[in-house]
Structures are given as structure tokens and as C-alpha cells.
Amino acid sequence: MTGFNLNKVKRHFTELLSTRFTMREANQLMRILLEDLFGIDLKQELLYPELRIDELQHATLEEAVNKLLKGMPIQYVTGIARFDDLVLHVDESVLIPRPETEGLVNHALKGFPHDRPLRVWDVGTGSGCVAIAVAKRLPQAKVLAFDIDEHALNTARHNAALNQVDVELVRDDVLAPTSEQWHHPVDLVISNPPYVREQERSTMEPTVLDFEPHIALFVPDDDPLRFYRQILQLALPQLTPTGAVWFEINEAMGEEMLQLCQSMDLQGNLYVDFAGKTRFCCVNFS
């Protein structure tokens, strides 16, 4: 019989992973690797205890485990991330979609009718996770996804096709905008812009610092709200009377966000995420 017994292979690589992770984490990682790389789910393992993998699969699994042992996030290892019931492709050109950002989408879409042709901006789309989730939930909406990075836009384009939604992708620098798309009425703006201050680098996990794109993470210590200010300046002239701007924010910058809103004669409200951290800000006309 050719190939490698999956149970033996799984035990071997789980033991290797347990040198860096807890045994529970090692088992979870192996489960994700088998399912995302080879489509082998737990049910198949239980039904077919003598299941085997070939040499190429073994080599692929070995390479994946070595990447995990070096600290690479599992989503970059498999190229797959899950977000709001979506399956997305990710690589190191885009941030890994996070559960907190799912909360941003959930908050932003409350109260918006699903059967009306709304116009929505996702500013700084990255993998496209927010834009695609909105397009899935609001099939009548026209969703525009902005990003400065062409590679990120290609990733978002691939993910939109993968999830069978129509999203208009726009390459532009929000800090120096040139696209005419900023000059049309908009009902909802959602953004998870860079918000980690440079001074916070030392508190971040190496898996984030070493692998995720810094352009999507960091802002200067002397102007940490630069993206929020600019997005509001772009959105406000176009925002419909019942429209809103929703941001994911740095948990340490809630009061500063409210002060920014007040300085622009806007109403800002803060909301917490599932962990009770101040993570979202809704901005609309006072």
C-alpha cells in the first residue's frame, strides 16, 4: 500500500507543533491544515481510519508545519481565512481578517434596509473582507472598495469572484485622493484603517509584526487619527442625510475620536467589541 497513514502522520506533526504550541492548539492547527490544504475533515478521519496521503501531500504538510513553527499565522500558511461565513484567500500583502472587524460589519449594517440600492464605501479594503460581506448581505447595494495597493486589490478581486459578489475596486490613496468616485453620494462608509501607533510596536505579537503588512497597521505617534480625519473630510460632502460612517478604532483612542468628531461638528458614538474593548465609532450628522 503506497503513501503515508494519515493517523501516524498527524501524530508526528502534532508532536512537532506541541514544541511551540499547547497540545490543544497543536491539535486545532492540524485540524485546520488537513481541512484547508486537503479537504480532509474530521468526519472523513473518523469514517476512514486507514486514510492515506501521498508524498506530495506529506511534503506540503511538512512545509506548512515548519512555517507554523517559525511563527507564520495559520491563515498565511494555508492561504485561507474565514470571515462572516465567507471563505477568503489571503497572503502577506493583506491583513488577516479578524473577528473584531466582523463586529464592525454587524454594527454598521444594523438599521440599513436590505432591499434598497444603497451606495457603500469600504475604505482600505485589503482582502476585501468588509466589502464582500456587505455585498453578500446587501445584494441591492453598490459597493466600492478602495485601496492604495494593487496587490491587495487583486486579492480582493479574487475574493469577490470566489464569493460570487459584485464589488467595484478602486485604486487610490485616501490621503491624496484623485478618483472621481469620491464625488458621488454615499449612504454608508465603513473603514478599518491603520490605527496602531508606532509606540505600540513593542506590545505586538511577533506573528503580526513579522508577517502582516505594516502599511496596513501603523500610523505616526504625532498624528494617529490621520486616516479618520481624511475619510470624514471625503465622506461628509457626499453623505446622505440618513447616512453614517463606521470605523474600527484603536481601543486607546476612543476619547480622541469623539474630540475629532466634535471639532468637525459631527456626532460620534463609541461601541465595544465582543471582548468589551472600545473598538468602533459611528459618525453621523449632529
Image (cartoon, rainbow, N blue to C red):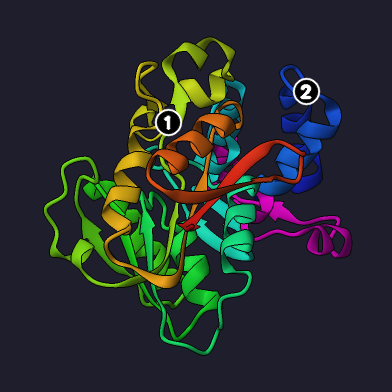
* Mark 1 residue crowding within 10 angstroms, few (<14) / some (14–19) / many (20+): some
Q: Write down the region rendered in magenta.
A: 34-62
Against 117, is 280 above or below?
above
Task: Residue at 50%, 58% (x, y): give it.
Answer: 88
**Residue designated by label 2:** 18
Seen from the viewer's position, the closer of residues 29 and 171 is: 171
Whether the magenta-drawn stretch holds residue 211 is answered as no
Q: Mostly what secondary structure, the magenta segment?
A: helix
Q: How many marks?
A: 2
Q: Amino acid type of disc 2? A: Ser
Q: Position of residue 202 (x, y in %)?
A: 53, 10
Mark 2–mark 1 Cα distance, whole angstroms, equals 30 Å
What residue appears at the point 42 percent right and 16 percent down from the top-left corner?
198
Graded by Cα atoms within 10 Å as few (under 14), some (14 to 19) or many (20 or more), the crowding at tag 2 reads some
Q: State if disc 1 and disc 2 touch (CB < 8 Å).
A: no
Residue drawn at point x = 59 percent, y = 54 percent: 104
x, y percentage for residue 271? 66, 47
In the picture of the structure, the residue carrying the numbered disc 1 is 217
Q: Position of residue 37 (x, y in %)?
A: 58, 52
In the visual, does 12 lie left or right of 184? Answer: right
Q: Is residue 216 left or right of residue 41?
A: left
Tell me the element at label 2. Answer: loop
Q: Is residue 193 above or below residue 243?
A: above
**Whole-percent x and y of residue 253?**
54, 29
Question: Is residue 98 among the parts visible in the rendering?
Answer: no
Q: Is residue 57 magenta?
A: yes
Side of 182 relative to 275 (left or right): left
Q: Amino acid at mark 1?
A: Leu
Using the rendered image of the protein, determine whether residue 256 is visible from the camera's viewpoint. yes
Above or below, 265 against 188 in this view is above
Q: Which sits earlier in the primary sequence, circle 2 or circle 1?
A: 2
Residue 189: give its label. none
